[in-house]
Image (spheres, rainbow, N blue to C red):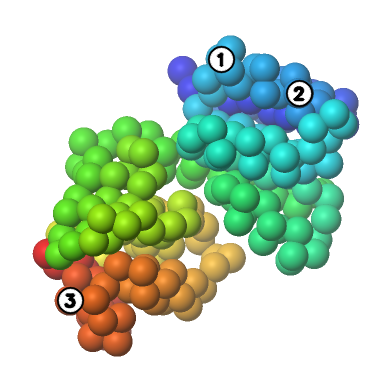
């Protein structure tokens, strides 16, 4: 049974989320502030964290930052009443995997929960590490090195590279990359994939303008080639 932790200080929302998640068959733990949330994470090691950003004692931003700094890679779904793009981007940059803006549709939130759990579930077909050229990537520790020097990749960049590497030599469409790495059906665009691939090439290819390993198949998608 998947364990889900909800950290939310609005009692009605907290109880509603708990009821719906339990109805879906998840084991649910709840906390009303960031410090209590951190304690439950260390005690129960949840498979997914649903995290409000505006929390007492320790904000969702700071909790997310602390978890990622400690090497905790549990998927985080942010809840926020803020609609500004900058706030969402900050949360994602700190290591959150997805967000829902209040007021939200319960059906949409449950779909995003399922998508995050599906993408984070262990899969034998996904490599734990790869080497190509002068690059070595460890997907378990979320570490990447080029010519022995550490390279900073975002979680989405790790996800894209891992999926492409799992299907080495085969073309992966932009739509498949969007669905399996982002878990959305509509919100991002195919330009989202293109922009992330461009960033990966700049960090990992010898010549980003003439990539040898992250290859574009025009009109279709991308493939990984050693």
Q: Quadrant of the C terminus?
A: bottom left
The answer to whether marks 3 and 1 mark residues whose Cβ atoms lie closer than 8 Å is no
Q: Is residue 32 above or below residue 219?
A: above
Which residue is tagged 3? 212
Picture quadrant where residue 10 is located: top right
**Residue 218: x and y, percent?**
26, 85
Q: Secondary structure at mark 1?
A: helix
Residue 191 or 157: which is nearer the viewer? 157
Residue 64 or 110: which is nearer the viewer? 64
Residue furthest front in the image: 148
Q: Secondary structure at mark 3?
A: loop
Which residue is tagged 2? 35
Evaluate whether residue 178 shows in this view: yes
The answer to whether marks 2 and 1 mark residues whose Cβ atoms lie closer than 8 Å is no
Q: Is residue 136 left or right of residue 184?
A: left
Which residue is tagged 1? 44
Q: Is residue 101 above or below residue 3?
A: below
Q: Is residue 79 above or below residue 45?
A: below
Q: Is residue 115 above or below residue 63?
A: below
Q: Residues within 10 Å of mark 2 (few under 14, many from 20)?
A: some
Q: CA distance from mark 2 to mark 3?
A: 47 Å
Q: Nearer the viewer, mark 3 or mark 1?
A: 3
């Amino acid at each position: 049974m998947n364990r889900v932790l909800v950290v939310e200080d609005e009692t009605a929302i907290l109880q509603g989320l708990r009821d719906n998640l339990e109805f879906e068959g998840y084991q649910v733990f709840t906390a009303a502030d960031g410090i209590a949330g951190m304690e439950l994470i260390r005690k129960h090691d949840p498979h997914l964290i649903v995290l409000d950003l505006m929390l007492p004692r320790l904000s969702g931003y700071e909790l997310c930052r602390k978890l990622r700094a400690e090497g905790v890679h549990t998927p985080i779904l942010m809840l926020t009443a803020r609609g500004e793009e900058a706030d969402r981007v900050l949360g994602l940059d700190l290591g959150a995997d997805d967000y829902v803006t209040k007021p939200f549709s319960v059906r949409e939130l449950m779909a995003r929960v399922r998508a995050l759990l599906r993408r984070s579930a262990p899969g034998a077909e996904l490599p734990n590490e790869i080497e190509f050229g002068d690059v070595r990537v460890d997907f378990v520790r979320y570490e990447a090195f080029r010519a022995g020097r550490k390279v900073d990749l975002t979680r989405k960049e790790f996800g894209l590279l891992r999926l492409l590497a799992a299907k080495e030599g085969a073309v992966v469409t932009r739509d498949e990359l969007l669905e399996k790495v982002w878990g959305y059906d509509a919100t991002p665009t195919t330009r989202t994939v293109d922009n992330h691939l461009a960033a990966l090439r700049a960090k990992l290819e010898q010549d980003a303008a003439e990539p040898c390993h992250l290859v574009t198949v025009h009109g279709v998608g991308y493939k990984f080639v050693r």
